[in-house]
Amino acid sequence: MIKSQPLTFPKNFVWGFAAAAPQIEGAAFLDGKGESVWDRFARRPGAVHNNDNLDVACEHYTRFDEDFRLMRSLGAKNYRLSLAWPRIYPDGDGALNQKGLDFYHRLFDSMEKHGLTPWVTMFHWDLPQSLETRFGGWRDRRTADAFAVYADTIVKAFGSRVKNWITLNEILCFTKLGYGVGRKAPGLQLADQVVNQTYHTALLCHGHGVRAVREHGGKGARVGLTDNATVTVPFSETPDDIAAARAQFIHENARVLDPIYTGGYGPAYRKAVGKHAAKFEKKDFDLISLPTDFLGLNIYTGEFVRAGKSGKPEKLPFPASYPTADAAWLKHVPQSLYWGPRHCAEIYGASSIYITENGAGYNDVPPAKGESNDLHRLNLVRSYLCELRRGIQDGVPVKGYFLWSFMDNYEWEDGYDRRFGVVYCDFKTQKRTPKFSARWFTKVMAENRIV
Ligand code: PNW
């Protein structure tokens, strides 16, 4: 007799959806919201697929109550969202926009009504344009001073109702990709030293976020960073390849994780950047390395690494036919959800890890009759969850998983065609229609196991 063993998760495992303000809210210039660097970047011809902008997005700004009703009906109890800095401080610093705070109070009221626990990201890429114009944005410490005030303000305002705080989302994406590669806002291609400086400013902001939560968060408040560490997967799970993957992980991720977990830039990183290093003050690291309560990881993909002939880590190129989502960077590497958290636990001693994003981006076609059949998305997520569960069984301390994303939304430079939602969003009518994957994920959450 063959009997299947349920692929269960630990009791109290946190399941939820993730999204971010600029990608769903719309109302980009309503009720006193200031311009963000993305509002500006999206207007640069050719910067974004179809020249799509964030002005309307999913109209979540006015539709949040029905969105939360749907989210709850799909069985979610946790929702990771972000607050729009330029809604609260239109210029980044200076005058506070009370209407921005009022909006988020209404939003949290609605979440409470629908039984959704908020996990709030302080910053998810929508830097107030004014800080970019006046100070050079992430290039300058005055942006960290402004962030400190913003963090204090939101933690004071919402600390009684928000207990889970995430300081910044994916430092790499708004620093290197924004100021070095130029693919994301503000779309600049500057020298290495400048890019390293943007990282350092971001780390300072992370520190201020932690400090603000400790000072004003109240009882039970918890805080951590969400990092998109590059995940290195050993080609074979042999001691040599594992050691190579681990060495490569440190090489690729030390610039963010070393300062936070060890209180400084490590010797290998310092050697690698040499004269292009960021300028910093020694005391910066007291702030940056304030202890956190958890580490958030956004993991979508990974790279395969093996021990080369000399024992040195060797990256394996992806063959042309390697399975990939419509997002070209999203190679199907389910093992990344095993190795990412494991490296962080083993190298940095991270003892409480949340997968704050994982999901699949495809150019889904509109649903034919009611529901779109997105077995491609379901299968990708399911295969990743199997690897996550393997890690948990091995003792990797992962405490929760947030699926990116609840509904299709503004996928940054890829615009509105690239869909990550388990709910289909018709951007013309704003009609939401759960996809096949939504009903599947509902079951996963309800039964706390992979179905
Ligand atoms: C994340 N890459 O971005 C962001 O946090 C979300 O806002 C975004 O919508 C989601 O993942 C899907 O893309 C990433 O090139 C963007 O490796 C690009 C990469 C990784 C994450």
Image (cartoon, helix red, strand yellow):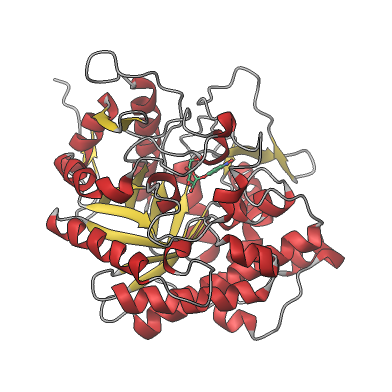
Q: Is residue 120 visible?
A: yes
Left or right: 142 as drawn, with respect to 395: right
Snapshot quadrant of residue 284: bottom right
Give 289 or 372, whichever is nearer the viewer: 372
| Residue located at (38% from left, 73% from top) | 154
| Residue located at (30% from left, 63% from top) | 104
| Residue located at (49% from left, 40% from top) | 300
Image quarter (top left, top right, bottom left or bottom right) of the C terminus: top left
| Residue 388, horizontal then vertical, whole percent | 38, 43
| Residue 227, horizontal then vertical, whole percent | 52, 56
Q: How many marks?
A: 0
Q: Is residue 16 visible?
A: no
Snapshot quadrant of residue 369: top left
| Residue located at (30% from left, 33% from top) | 430
Image quarter (top left, top right, bottom left or bottom right) of the N terminus: top left
| Residue 260, horizontal then vertical, whole percent | 56, 71
Left or right: 217 as drawn, with respect to 3: right
Q: In the picture shown, does residue 41 fall above or below 289?
A: above
State the residue lying farthest toward the top: 368
| Residue 439, horizontal then vertical, whole percent | 21, 30
